[in-house]
Amino acid sequence: MKLSSLALSVNLPHLVASVACPFAELYARGLLSESDAAKFEAVKRDPEAAKAILELHQRDAEPDPAPQSGGLIGPVIGGILDLPLGGGLLDGVLQPLTGVLAGLDIPTPQPQGFVVIPGDDPDHQFQAPGATDVRGICPTLNALANHGYISRDGITSFAEAANAVQTGYGFGYGLSVFLSALGLLAGGDLITGKYSIGGADSRVPNTIGPALGLDKHGVFEIDGSITREDVHFGNNANFLLQRWEEYVNISDQNGGQFGAATQAYDNVSPPNLVFIRLVSLAHVEVADIFEKGLRYDYSRETNPEFLAGVAWFAVSHAERVFVYEGLANGTVTGSGDANYANIAPFFLNETFPPEWFRRGVPLPLAGAFAEAAALFLANPRELGGNEGLGNFVPLDTNITSLTPAELGCFLLENFLDLAPNQIQPTVVNNLDTFSGFVKGIVAPFFIDDGYFNCNVTSFVEPSASAGVNQTGSQSSSGSPVNGAYPGIGVIAPDSEPS
């Protein structure tokens, strides 16, 4: 279990000063690799060795100098910028795209800092969605729509959504662009930049292929989610009250906080067999990691079509990080207060809580990846999928030995393969367009940044023979006020499966 890279990627002296060595217990239990154990023994013999190891890690992490054009940052091939459709970062800001993507609006950095949201701004007070307004499976986007930070009808755009999550939740510019780009790829129209935060909608054009919305199973909507059931069992848009109550009960066991310990338990965990310290960019928490995972293992055991691929790895961990890093009330120092009073309104009413303050320091892309990787690497689960119950077929990829930065590069290289099966043929048939979008918009945030420093020359292409079945996605049309979707209904608390 490679945890040394997580510790070395944060401020080591602060870590040592704030908590007893997090590796002593792992060393005693034989859970460190031979390399990590040797480093631990060296530090025990000579504390100065910690400084030498840290310097070595920092030197290895330094980016290789790459030729750039006029300060523009983007993928480089043979010393030449590879931006076939424009874009790239200049002074930290994305540049316009060209060619078939010239009409795509580009997100811009938004004012950040500690401020109450929505405050008394008359343009951003809560309004329940109307009969024709679309809402989906993401409570954070639903809340932004209910408060008018994105279009209240639920039909948003690449730039609008990226700008809104900066303003509403204090996400950094790079992280916001990455998430909205993933949303556009998952269910939108690449040429116009429009997508539905729910299911397919006639207000989103299908310029080069089907725009299926974010509810489409496979990217933002995944198996083993926090409050929705697997699509195999029925309506993947319904809010499952039973799952929410289980989620709350887990938080009660962790001091009433929906922090890293609660997320680790809910995602891959139930009783305590091994204790792992989750080392994150902002804080250190102790989480009970269990032999039997709660959401992952239950879905793997009961869902004959369970899929835990690259998208599952990214979304299932990132969505849990966003709960305590994005929804916590910033009035508390540190990582914020992620208690019931601050988290429940987002899930149950899809609104900002009273006197809710946005985080004071933007959540960067690297920080989000580090936290998500900590959750995954603390107790990794096998990537793959079921071909019938009891027949789990693992992916021919072992990512458990990768560092958080390497996991980010892995995700970037597989970005195009994150498209749902139903639109993968569209990606293949328009590969130059999709590849140009990723090279110009997404890749620059992973290159020469002092953290990821990805050397990306190509992307994994999706299979052209992917399925074309259009079923399996349902969009909720109303906000779950106090845990109930009008017109759709909630799975009863005693219903199965969980």
Image: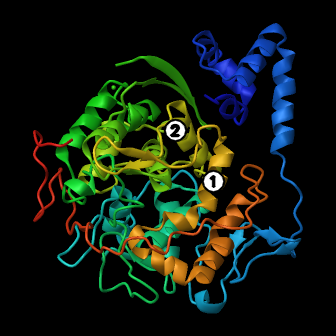
Q: Looking at the image, is 21 positioned above or below residue 309? A: above
Residue 290, quarter of the rendered image: top left
Q: Which residue is mark 1?
A: 410
Type of the residue with mark 2: Phe
* Residue occupying image coordinates x 44% and y 51%: 312
N-terminal label among 1 and 2: 2
Residue closer to the observer: 315 or 20 = 315
Residue 207, given in percent of the width and then of the height, sits at 44, 90
419 relative to 245 in the view: left or right: right
- Check disc 2 and report its element: helix, strand or loop: helix
Residue 73 seen in the figure: no
Residue 331, given in percent of the width and then of the height, sits at 47, 41
Q: Which mark is residue 96?
A: none
Q: Which residue is mark 2?
A: 376
Quarter containing the N terminus: top right
- Check disc 1 and report its element: helix, strand or loop: helix
Residue closer to the observer: 276 or 450 = 276
Please rate how many residues cluster around mark 1, counting C-alpha atoms within 10 Å: few if below 14, some from 14 to 19, many from 20: some
Quarter containing the C terminus: top left
